[in-house]
Amino acid sequence: MVKILFLVLSFLFSASEIKADVLADTVEKLKPAIVAVGTFMPKRAPRAVFRGTGFAIADGSLVATNAHVIPEHLATENMEKIAVFIKRNGKDTMYLTTVVTIDKEHDIAVLKLTEGRLFPLVLDMDSNVREGDLFAFTGFPIGMVLGLYPATHTGIVSAITPVAIPMINARQLNAKVMKRLRHPYKVYQMDAIAYPGNSGSPLFHPVTGKVVGIINSVFVKESKETILSRPSGISYAIPVKYLEKILSNYKSSL
């Protein structure tokens, strides 16, 4: 009996070790596609400001992120531009970008590098995401604080839920929330800790590395000031089908 128990425990340990190795290999392959998204201004201190995360797609010249990561106004008079940042060959590297398209309803934006290309990720349009499935996401959880060293988190899809959560009282209602309540679409609720800097991070399969969603928001249980010290552990991701749709529209317009 003791021998059988030992064999079972050994098998379970080996299985978990294999899974960890597989995820480690996947993360290593994906990291060259993960970028910090922000703005660059030559005479500002600091010149670079991170606002979120993004990842390369298509032929490597396009970057997907959240719409709310992109500033609505740029200080063009001071040459402020949207840029992505990545560590390549041990050096911090910047790529200037232009905005290709923004889908505010689904909180998705696509940028185009003005020059150069990155390693692109594959969008998984055939995945049947189910509650309980395990996924991972990689991004920059606290922006510039940790530098250009993307971090990976894992969690299960705890629920597939409407994007708009009913408000407790009328004071929490606004035009944006009202629109979502009238026309809700489903998002993935993740049992994983994410932070504001994770906005735009790819949610991917730990084995294949294919992207199934984009991290777009974090449930804050207290206040924005306490989100770092007391994270709720609940995050949301937009299904990748909405990114694929705006990509198809972009390609058809070329």
Image (tube, rainbow, N blue to C red):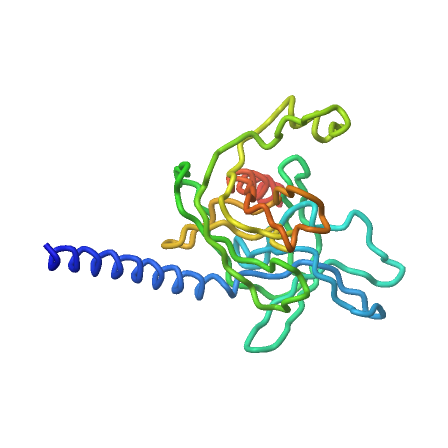
Apparent side of residue 86 relative to residue 212 in the rendered image (left or right): right
Location of residue 164 with respect to 238 vertically, above or below? above
Apparent side of residue 41 relative to residue 212 in the rendered image (left or right): right
Residue at the image position 60 percent from the left and 27 percent from the top: 184
Location of residue 170 with respect to 144 vertically, above or below? above
Residue at the image position 70 percent from the left and 60 percent from the top: 50
Q: Nearer the viewer, residue 181 or 233?
A: 233
Q: Nearer the viewer, residue 86 or 15?
A: 15
Give how far across and how far down residue 104 sits, in percent.
Answer: 68, 38
Give how far across and how far down residue 164 sits, in percent.
Answer: 62, 30
Location of residue 220 with respect to 83 vertically, above or below? above
Q: Nearer the viewer, residue 111 or 183?
A: 183
Mark count: 0
Q: Quadrant of the N terminus?
A: bottom left
Apparent side of residue 228 relative to residue 59 in the rendered image (left or right): right
Residue at the image position 82 percent from the left and 70 percent from the top: 45
Q: Residue furthest bottom?
A: 90
Location of residue 94 with respect to 188 vertically, above or below? below
Q: Residue furthest front?
A: 2
Q: Residue furthest top?
A: 182
Give how far across and how far down residue 132 sits, in percent.
Answer: 39, 40
Give how far across and how far down residue 144 sits, in percent.
Answer: 68, 65
